[in-house]
Image (cartoon, helix red, strand yellow):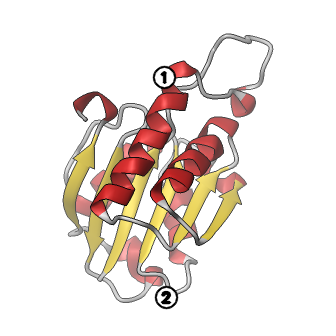
């Protein structure tokens, strides 16, 4: 069994309209929600061993804030392929993860994260910004992830519900 944590980036700022989408930072709410999710992870003992994140500023800042608050001490990999709104690059990135990692967190964008969770579990869940989902996968090797359709959606946490 492997555990996948899926985190949608926290709320981003649209204040500077000259910024490219990739470079948008977090807004005030996003700067608050990302560490709250990390604190929740620490409280629940859901500390990933590896974090894969989109290179978009709002995603990797969310990943860093959550990681810092959770007590994460592993490796964080920024992947330009995860700056995507399609779940396929997420599945491909996860399929390349070394089997030594039991708990992996992926940080990215909608609708990709919603679709990824639905592909893996057969259940649709809304992923407002800074939503975290915990999925148990019936695999021993990350390379098998593209064949998973019966993962178990164990929990979903949305900042407004905390």
Q: Where, by quadrant of the figure, is residue 84 drawn?
A: top right
Is residue 113 shown to the viewer in this render? no
Residue 113 position within the rendered picture, expressed as x and y whole percent measured from the top left: 42, 47
- Residue appearing at x 51%, y 39% in the figure: 9
- Residue appearing at x 28%, y 60% in the figure: 44
Q: In this view, does 140 lie to the left or right of 16?
A: left
**Label 2 near label 1: C-beta < 8 Å?**
no
The relative height of residue 102 versus residue 54 in the rendered view (above or below) is below
* Foreground residue among 26 and 68: 68
- Residue appearing at x 58%, y 61% in the figure: 52
Q: Where, by quadrant of the figure, is residue 65 drawn?
A: top right
* Foreground residue among 80 and 47: 47
List the residue tagged with mark 2. 99
Secondary structure at badge 2 equals loop
Residue 123 position within the rendered picture, expressed as x and y whole percent measured from the top left: 19, 51
List the residue tagged with mark 1. 29
The label on residue 50 is none
Q: In this view, does 104 lie to the left or right of 120?
A: right
The relative height of residue 16 versus residue 88 in the rendered view (above or below) is above
């Amino acid at each position: 069994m492997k555990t996948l944590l899926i985190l949608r980036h926290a709320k981003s700022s649209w204040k500077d309209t000259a910024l490219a989408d990739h470079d948008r930072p977090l807004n005030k709410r996003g700067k608050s929600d990302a560490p709250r999710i990390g604190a929740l992870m620490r409280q629940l003992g859901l500390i990933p061993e590896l974090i894969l994140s989109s290179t978009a500023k709002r995603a990797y800042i969310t990943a860093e804030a959550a990681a810092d608050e959770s007590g994460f001490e592993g490796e964080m990999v920024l992947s330009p392929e995860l700056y995507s709104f399609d779940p396929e690059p997420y599945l491909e990135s996860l399929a390349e993860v070394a089997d030594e990692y039991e708990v992996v967190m992926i940080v990215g964008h909608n609708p990709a994260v919603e679709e990824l969770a639905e592909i893996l579990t057969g259940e649709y869940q809304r992923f407002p910004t800074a939503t975290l989902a915990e999925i148990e996968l019936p695999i021993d090797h990350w390379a098998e992830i593209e064949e998973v359709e019966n993962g178990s959606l164990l929990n979903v946490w949305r900042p407004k519900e905390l």
